[in-house]
Amino acid sequence: MKIVFQHHSPLPVMGYGGTERILFWHMKELTRLGHSVVFIGPADSQVEAHGIELIPIQNNWESLIPKSADIIHLSHNQKVPGDIPTIQTVHGNGKLGELFCLNSVFVSKKHAELHGSNQFVHNAIDLSEYPFEYSPKNWDQFLFLAKASWRVKNLAQSVKASRSASKHLHVAGGRWWGLSRYIHNHGIIGGEQKIKLIRSCDALLFPVRWHEPFGIAVIEAMSQGLPVIGSTYGSLPELINPEAGFVVNNYNELLDKVKNPKKAFDPRVIRKYVEDQFAITKHSQSYLALYEKVISGVILNPEAPTYQLKERAENLLPF
């Protein structure tokens, strides 16, 4: 199968970029499985060493699509002219009134439902970039791994709970602007530095106040055996099973779990859960099945998906 991807950022991404990393891992996995993968993107992309054909992007990138392509896979909302079948992954929440293409696929079951669809493939990670080193966990060092400046990620109540419980919180993805011996700012980090920080912590705090489409930080933390304390919104109840953390309804429940989980988690069980459910191999196999459907003429959604709620996705939900 010849599969064409297009993206505006160079791949592989050097710094922060959840969407870009998942896209690149998926492209590499498809190549490993024997498919022909073409990337229309910035000329400074370093994909050819991984067996991916690079077509440097121009203003009218659609004119560069090889006529021999079997399918086009996009990660942004755009209609592509021509008769080559197209599929689109929707990574974020839609704007009010925004319509997505009929062959849109979402990143979790709840994410799909919130857009009037039932088509989803869970995000995944390349576990070769997340080697596991077992170590027993205490309950003193917590991690906040998200864009700290984005209010929906709820750094404020993560800090409040940690300080109230006299627990240490390591903030990665920005910083908390305050003084406390319990809060440690690490800024925006990636690669081995991020892996080391995750391993040094005991659990991830992820009490988001919006309908989280997926939350790759959740499975990154779990890949290193960390349980996750997350809110009830969006995909989190799908991702956090009882052996891998807690889903909490409000701040008081968050504080209670931070103070004392009243149960022990096995990092090896959590790692195995990620291997079984969120490895890039499973992700790519799921998309290959969808590619075959779309190429055969199946329309994935009977109507154009659109965000179903009446308020902006970024409006803070109660917690």
Image (cartoon, helix red, strand yellow):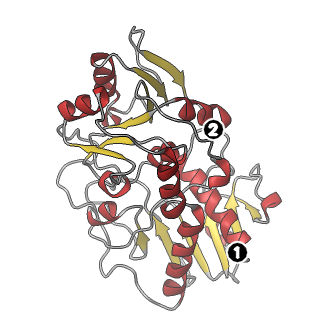
Image side of residue 67 versus residue 296, left or right: right
Three-letter code for the amino acid on which mark 2 is drawn: Gly
Front one among 57 and 293: 293
Front one among 19 and 238: 238
Work out whether 166 lies above or below 126.
above
Q: Residue furthest right?
A: 49
Image side of residue 32 versus residue 177, left or right: right
Q: Which residue is mark 2?
A: 15
Looking at the picture, how far across and down is residue 303, in whole percent?
Answer: 29, 78
Q: Secondary structure at mark 1?
A: loop
Q: State which quarter of the image contains the C terminus.
A: top left
Work out whether 319 lies above or below 235.
above
Q: Which residue is mark 1?
A: 33
Looking at the picture, how far across and down is residue 83, in whole percent?
Answer: 55, 85
Front one among 127 and 235: 127
Q: Nearer the viewer, mark 2 or mark 1?
A: 1
Q: Residues within 10 Å of mark 2 (few under 14, many from 20)?
A: few
Tell how many labels.
2
> Which residue shows up at 76% across the image and 49% down it?
44
